[in-house]
Amino acid sequence: MNYQKYYTKEVKEKSSEKLFNVISCFAGGGGSSTGYRLAGANILLINEFVEEAISTYKANFPDTKVLVDDIKKYTSDDFLEMAGIKVGELDLLDGSPPCSAFSLSGKRNKGWVGYVDDTTQSEIDFETGEVIQTGEKKIKEGIKKYSTKVQEGIEDLFLEYIRIAK
């Protein structure tokens, strides 16, 4: 496997090309954003509420707008407005919502394989469906649980939500 080293300066230079617009939800410390920037992305807005992650992101990319709040409080229109763009101007909406509730190693109640003890995080998967319709191209973190028989109903519901939102 070939690995190419890069430095923050190079990431910022590539990002200045502004080839496509991105909003990143659950951005963490900026791993996905770094890759998008290396591809020439213009990161318009990120959403994160974990302080350590925000500190890391801001240390590397201090000029990025950061929404430090619960994503469930906002609509698609809110995100577009905060990013300073209109419908059709967002090329990519990135989202890596908390997935521990669906992890195959997540804590489950005995006797019912499909139950996971974390409704708040699992609800976020469906609520990002409201925000996800803002972009023409979407990237959502791939989680193995989406391909398991136990969780197949959740994937069907999420995909149906996106279909209706379009």
Image (cartoon, rainbow, N blue to C red):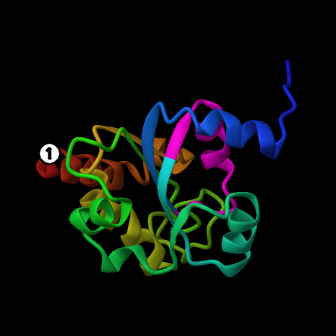
Q: Nearer the viewer, residue 133 or 44?
A: 44
x then y, percent, for residue 94: 46, 49
| Residue at 68%, 58% in the rendered image | 61
x then y, percent, for residue 111: 51, 72
For mark 1, give the secondary structure.
loop
Q: Quadrant of residue 13?
A: top right
Q: Mark 1: give few (<14), some (14-19) or many (20+) Cα within 10 Å.
A: few
- The number of numbered badges drawn on the structure is 1
Q: Nearer the viewer, residue 160 or 77?
A: 77
| Stretch of the chain drawn in magenta | 26-42
Left or right of 114? Residue 3 is right
x then y, percent, for residue 113: 49, 64
Q: Magenta stretch: residue 119 in it?
A: no
| Residue at 54%, 48% in the rendered image | 143
x then y, percent, for residue 79: 32, 64
Q: What residue type is disc 1 on?
A: Lys
Left or right of 5? Residue 34 is left
- The answer to whether residue 137 is above or below residue 106 is above
Q: Nearer the viewer, residue 99 or 146?
A: 99
Q: Quadrant of the N terminus?
A: top right
| Residue at 66%, 61% in the rendered image | 105
| Residue at 63%, 77% in the rendered image | 50
Reading the image, the residue beneath label 1 is 166
Left or right of 145? Residue 125 is left
Q: Quadrant of the C terminus?
A: top left
Q: Magenta stretch: residue 35 in it?
A: yes
